[in-house]
Amino acid sequence: MINIIDGGVTAPKGFKASGVACGLKNKQKKDLAVVYSNDIAVAAGVFTKNVVKGHSLQLTMEHIKSGHARALVINSGNANACLGERGYRDAEEMASLAAQLLNCDTKNVLVGSTGVIGMPLDLPKVCSGIKDAVSLLSEEGGHDAAEAIMTTDLVSKEIAVEFEIQGEKVRIGAMAKGSGMIHPNMATMIGVITTDANISKELLDKALKDAIAHTFNRVSVDGDTSVCDMVVILANGEANNEGIVKEDIDYSTFKSALEYVCTHLSKMIAKDGEGATKLIEVVVEGAKNDEDAYNVVSAVAKSPLVKTAIFGEDANWGRIITAAGYSGADFDPNLVDIYIGELMVCHSGTGLNFDEEKAKEILKEDEVRIKIDLKMGDASDRIWTCDFSYDYVKINGSYRS
């Protein structure tokens, strides 16, 4: 049984965190977070597939090759990206200072940055923030850390769960940020997951990648994929379970809990998309293969015309079948059924005389489900997205202001 508990990234044993304002954002909003494990932790990560990568991300990708980490430093308000050698040196300085203050190896410090691309970090402010954040580390600091990594997010995103493995209570805590430039693989999001489970490096890496494939990598806000995106997980073993070293029932239990956490945060990211008023789940069934299923859900989820129709509460299913048609998937349009909520609006590729008022009631809800049945095979997929409102343009038209 998976039980939701309080605490975010500090819910698992042996983790501390903090979040402070160092001046990278306006109005003294929190903009620097530190997450720290009392003991060295097994570490794994998944990173953006964008060829352009931020300097902090590059450093983390290098440090995590060891499979271990002790701490993570994240700043918001500045992406530390596309700055040449200076950007990488600044990331190294962040890791080095944190390591010095935490009395650990620099290579065991991971770094994340998110915000405006191409603007140099104000390193004195960042260093001052790291010093403050380290001094404020506590087992109650998870909420502050979750707030400090936000950019255009309207709400902080965190969750913690508790379950049992090998007779011991095990916890997973997590936080994430993300609101715009969201699309697989990956998006303008940073996720930090902590656990006190005792699990091998190889299985932790496998569990994370498998969980992310159909959670964080099934979120789309606007079809853009940024340069600083990552999800990392630290497992310090302080739950004192015997150890997860093979793909057995204990591994399955851990993976299920991890997927639960990732699903929760993924839906929060989609629901908090820039300017969003509705969470949309796009489901495809009956595809010939996994690739076709993914191509259809991805095309529908990032279609501006579909998203604006949902915002306007207009059951314009023609936009849905059109997006499926240009997705690259192989299917017969004369077989397609489309549902908005439980209401069938298209049968075998032909429009139905459905109840428009009923459709509008469904589209007024905060969460809307679109299902497309291709009737070509057994493959299926789903993705979470949001509607496009007027506010999306307002937010992104003045992002640097």
Image: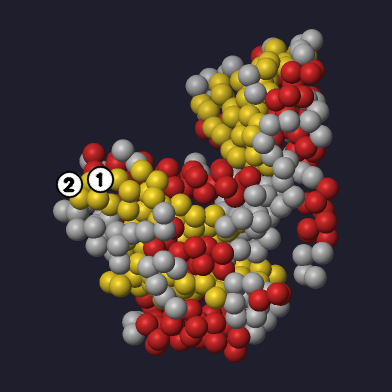
Residue closest to the far top: 353
- Crowding at dot 1, Cα within 10 Å, few <14 / some 14-19 / many 20+, comes out as some
Displayed quadrant of residue 354: top right
Spatial distance from mark 2 to mark 1, Cα to Cα? 6 Å
Q: Which residue is mark 1?
A: 164
**Residue under the point 72% across and 42% down:** 277
Q: Tell whether 355 sits left or right of 365.
A: right
Displayed quadrant of residue 148: bottom right
The quadrant of the rendering that contains the N terminus is top left
Q: Which residue is mark 2?
A: 167
**Residue under the point 68% across and 15% down:** 344
Q: Which three-letter amino acid code belongs to the residue tagged 2?
A: Gly
Q: Position of residue 76 (x, y in %)?
A: 61, 70
Name the element at disc 1.
Answer: strand
**Residue under the point 66% across and 68% down:** 115
Q: Which three-letter amino acid code belongs to the residue tagged 1?
A: Glu
Residue 172 appears in the picture as rendered? yes
